[in-house]
Amino acid sequence: MAGFDLNRRLAAEALGTAFLVATVVGSGIMAETLTKDVALQLLGNTLPTGAMLVVLITILGPISGAHFNPAVSLVFAAQGDLKPRETALYIVAQILGGIAGTIAAHLMFGLPAIEFSAKIRTGGAQWFAEVIATFGLVAVILAGIRFKETAVPWLVGLYITGAYWFTASTSFANPAVAIARAFSNTFSGIRPLDLPGFIVAQLVGAFLALMLLSWLLATPRQADTVLKPEAKL
């Protein structure tokens, strides 16, 4: 992010989240148009999302860090990588960008710009799935940055592609994306009433991952890695 001022970073966050949500919502609409098979619809929603994440993180990551996700921004803020004001502005940019992405997807397919979703996504299983989905996403990001930063776009894209299928919630794992999807009464939508449960679960998952990975990835002390003289005997 060196060399890029806050305005450019915010623009990158808004643009990236907009394209991410446009992909999620638009591919869901396209999938519903092309087939009535729900499994194929989900596959048609999954692959473009994973692919788009690889692209967006690769091209926008050097500008803003490519969070596109309030939970991720809060994790980096907790680590001291973002100041409170920057964090708040990142989150606003992500939410506004996500809503713009929903509107863009609707307009491309000739739908009303905004349609509040009636799709019910609630209950303990769904919330637990979001805890797991977001935990995994944050863990992948933190471990990826530690061990192979250049692979992070692929790691995130592949993780979300897989998480669509092994989580009961289809892995929203992102409060901004969840909010944006509440404005779409299509395949990828979520009822506004169900947002609080999802957002709380996502934040819980993100901070559980931060706590575990902070311990797991801590640099070992020299005393832990070098045998003491008497241990060599």
Image: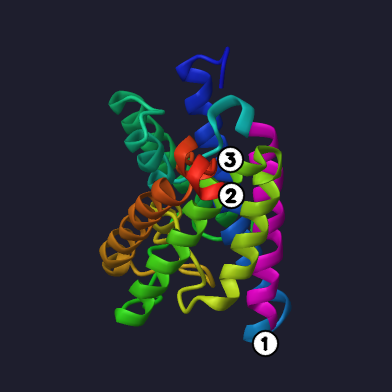
Residues 113 and 85: in front is 85
Q: What's the residue at 65%, 45% (across, down)? A: 152
Disc 2 residue crowd, few under 14, some 14–19, many 20+, Cα 10 Å: many
SS of the residue under disc 3: helix
Residue annotated with mark 1: 37
Q: Earlier in the sequence, mark 2 or mark 1?
A: 2
Query: How far from the left and from the top, in percent, is residue 46?
Result: 65, 67
Whole-number angstrom distance, CA of label 2 to CA of label 1: 24 Å
Disc 2, disc 3: CB below 8 Å? no
Query: How far from the left and from the top, in percent, is residue 37?
Result: 67, 87
Residue 40 visible in the displayed image: yes
- The disc placed on residue 20 is 2
- The disc placed on residue 103 is none
- The disc placed on residue 145 is 3
Residue 223 is drawn in which quadrant?
top left
SS of the residue under disc 2: helix
Query: How far from the left and from the top, in percent, is residue 178?
Result: 41, 58
